[in-house]
Image (tube, helix red, strand yellow):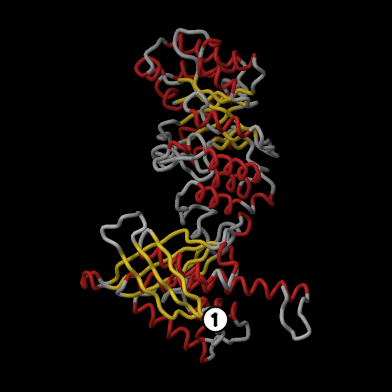
Amino acid sequence: MRKVYIFDSTLRDGSQAQGISFSVSDKMKIVKKLDEIGINYIEAGNPGSNPKDREFFREIKQIPLKNAKICAFGSTRKIGIKAKDDQNLKELINAGTSVIAIFGKAWDFHVTDIIKTTLEENLNMIYDSIMYLKLHNKEVIFDAEHFFDGYKKNKDYAIKVLLVAEKAGADSLVLCDTNGGTMPFEVSEILKELIDKYHFKNLGIHCHNDSGNAVANSIIAVKYGVNHVQGTITGFGERCGNANLSTIIADLQVKMGYDIITPKNLEQLTATYRYICEVSNVIPNEKEPYVGSYAFAHKGGMHIDAVYKNPHSFEHAPPETVGNERKILMSEVSGRSTVMSIINSVDPNIKKDSDQVKKIIERLKELEYQGYQFEGAEGSFELLVRKELGLFRPFFHLIEYKMMIDKPSTTDKSATVAMKIKVNETVEVTAADGYGPVNALDIALRKALSVFYKSISSMYLTDYKVRVIGTEKATSAKVRVIIESTDGHKTWTTIGVSSDIIEASFEALVDSVEYSLLKEENKNEQKCHDNDTKDISGTCRA
């Protein structure tokens, strides 16, 4: 099959999303991650627009990349001047990238009413700018801005824009659905005419998601002959966002058979998506296709039973293909087989009709009646199973904590926690300030435990949710706290419920830490078993 190139614009178009602001360091991290996964082009910013982007282009020259080409972005020359005198084009050349993307207007309305020039001058601006960049031996990607809207309003002029860019030597002609309102059937009709009637080659597609069709439009465009797809790996972008490349890459490779990235890199797709969300300080979309934490989550009892028999029954693709994992959500509608999967992951010898299973199910129902919801807290549920089976040994015991909150506070850190814990026979006392009571509790607990468990430093909280249960009780109502944590590789969630929000938060924090330490202990035991590194007394030395 023909090669399809992936062009990521997270650092340029993605940065235009509300709430997104990348530092130079953030950009460097994202570039490295996109390069590792095998992205072909990384549009990294506009050197003519701000000093931060200019600094980035200086810094990135020092970083060797294996797969990606760095691309600088800018506009065509200004009205009424020569290309060689345009400061923006000079900045693009000075950025030192081998690839440059420039945009020009393809909709006559934008030419006459927005940038206020003639249709002929707009064509000259496009031609002159591309020629100037080609004279400097640059690979030029031309973004025909508002192409689809322009094509629908004035087809002849939109075609002229592409012909002029092609004549000037543009290496790729990218059709932009800038307003994001084009329908998939329109994209297919327009692409068919461009290729069959006008014989355009090296076409690209750049879609926004304002009508919810960015991914569909990109996929349709590839089917009809486009070989260059633009978007952002997370779907970040202005307004409703850009085409989501994590979905597009998986669709093209898993569903359509294109060789987009290596299968090994495809297995890193979920981790890459979550990493870039983390660097961008954005909570990952749990329902994102392929890479979301709910993408392969099952809750209904009959669905779960079918998935156990054959995953293909309720999954369109194997989750491990994109580095994700199947989740069986725990709830009162999940069925006994769901509970058994967790129980048997702890102790494979327990039978379905045993008293232990009945006891765990009764405990599950009792806790859900109290307000717990284990479908979003698999870490807490595994700990519950271990406790009910007598297979849990606490890693520490809380003796007490005391909290002081200053209002008004003289600093940003308004809460102070003094904490005393016990590990085996050793007592540790510590204190910590935080931006609030929960933050102070989190810092104090991990500070105390770090004396005994070094791995605690690698885990951190990524999300914190509070839900009021029984609102008729007003301020005395129970709250459910869900905490999401990670060690950089695996993510888990834990839960706490109480009429005291601090108590509920601390319960979820303790479960999060206990789960992390449990997994670390299991990993060390496995390493010890694999390497047979026990001393004469039988103690593991891993």
Taking 48 as reference, is 213 above or below it?
A: below
The reply to whether residue 392 is in sight is no
Q: Residue at image x 58%, y 50%?
A: 272
Residue sitting nearer the eye, 375 or 221: 375
Q: Position of residue 460 (x, y in %)?
A: 51, 61
Q: Quadrant of the N terminus?
A: top right
Q: Position of residue 307 (x, y in %)?
A: 56, 68
Q: Residue at image x 57%, y 20%?
A: 198
Classify residue 354 by image quadrant. bottom right
Tag 1: residue type? Answer: Thr
Q: Position of residue 113 (x, y in %)?
A: 34, 17
Q: Residue at image x 67%, y 18%?
A: 137
Taking 198 as reference, is 3 above or below it?
A: below
Q: Quadrant of the C terminus?
A: bottom right
Q: Which residue is mark 1?
A: 426
Residue sitting nearer the eye, 87 or 346: 87
Query: Tag 1: Cα neighbours inside 10 Å, few (<14), some, or many (≥20)?
Result: few
Residue sitting nearer the eye, 264 or 500: 500
Residue sitting nearer the eye, 47 or 66: 47
The reply to whether residue 388 is in sight is yes
- In the picture as drawn, the residue positioned furthest to the bottom comes out as 355
